[in-house]
Amino acid sequence: MGLPIYRKSNHGVYVSVGSERSFMGAALSSANGLFVIDYDPQTIRFANINRALLAASTDRADYLNLRLSASPELWRQRSEGLAAEDKETLSNPDSWTFWDKKVRKNQAAWDNAFGHFHTAPKSPSDPFFASNYLFDDRLYSHLSQLAKRSRIWGLQLDLRHENEVRSFCEELKSKGLTLGVIDTSDVPNASGTGARVAAQYVKLMSQYAPDSAIFLNTAPTGGQGVHWSYFGFSNGKIRARDLTTIQRWYEIEMKKISSTNQLHSLLDDPDAIRH
């Protein structure tokens, strides 16, 4: 459901929480860089290892082998010639052990969708149809090129902490990165304070983003976390708004999505931004 929004990206850097969500979004939006941010250190570790595997791979079939079945010895061999950080990551036996347990054997409570992700989608009703870079040469190639050009970064960050968000924005500025999509998944749905927290980090990040940047989120359709709808606001609509207004926009969209079983893909929804 997010494809109509991804297609409206300015193709700048894709900033995202989550593991595979980050990589899929960067591929689908043709981003010129990927910055994975998350409060969970395991998610950042996943991102760093996956970047190294993408950088080491020669094609999609080779990447699948490295990802799903290659030995730690082959990882070590293929680490030769990589950039320093990726070389250290891929040659470290602890990286292989983590990957084997948390990704291959799907023992990670923090991301239990790897079983579906490692299965090739055949029809539009299958999970990750038309968005899984493991089984799509074009999507894989885009991510592989980003990894080989050192255009994928990982940073442990808690969006609830203003000082961490501000420091991250300064890092983006120092790197000269143009923000394309800022994808914070279902953070605004957090009980009680989610929409307020979202308004705070969105308002702060908006100062560092062009008008074309998109703040993207998901919410459970029908109020149940089985099917997810996407909604977002362009920075041109966000920039001049105060925190109360932004929070209200998020609350309107989440209520709209939860009140129906219809899947939505909403960008600058008039039902929200006119309030």
Image (cartoon, helix red, strand yellow):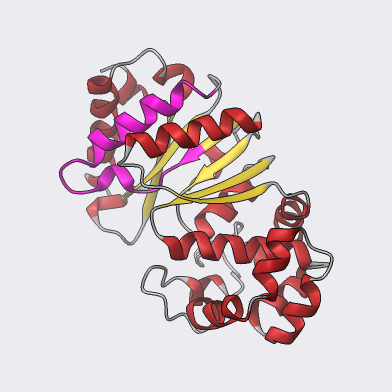
Residue 129 within the segment the image draws in magenta: no
Tell which of 90 and 18 is nearer to you.
90
Residue found 52% across the figure and 78% down from its top = 98
**Number of callouts in the render?**
0
Q: Residue furthest top?
A: 240
Tell which of 60 and 125 is nearer to you.
60
- In the image, which residues are magenta? 182-209
Residue 49 lies left or right of residue 219; in this view the side is right
Residue found 61% across the figure and 38% down from its top = 13
Q: Is residue 199 above or below residue 108?
A: above
Residue 201: image quadrant is top left
Residue found 42% across the figure and 81% down from its top = 107
Residue found 45% across the figure and 66% down from its top = 42
Residue 66: image quadrant is bottom right
Residue 262 lies left or right of residue 120; in this view the side is left
**Is the C terminus in the top left, top right, bottom left or bottom right quadrant?**
top left
Residue 78 lies left or right of residue 26; in this view the side is right
Q: Is residue 176 above or below residue 223?
A: above
Q: Is residue 248 above or below residue 4?
A: above
Tell which of 93 and 269 is nearer to you.
93
Tell which of 118 and 262 is nearer to you.
118
The percent coordinates of residue 132 (x first, y second) are 61, 62
Q: Is residue 232 visible?
A: no
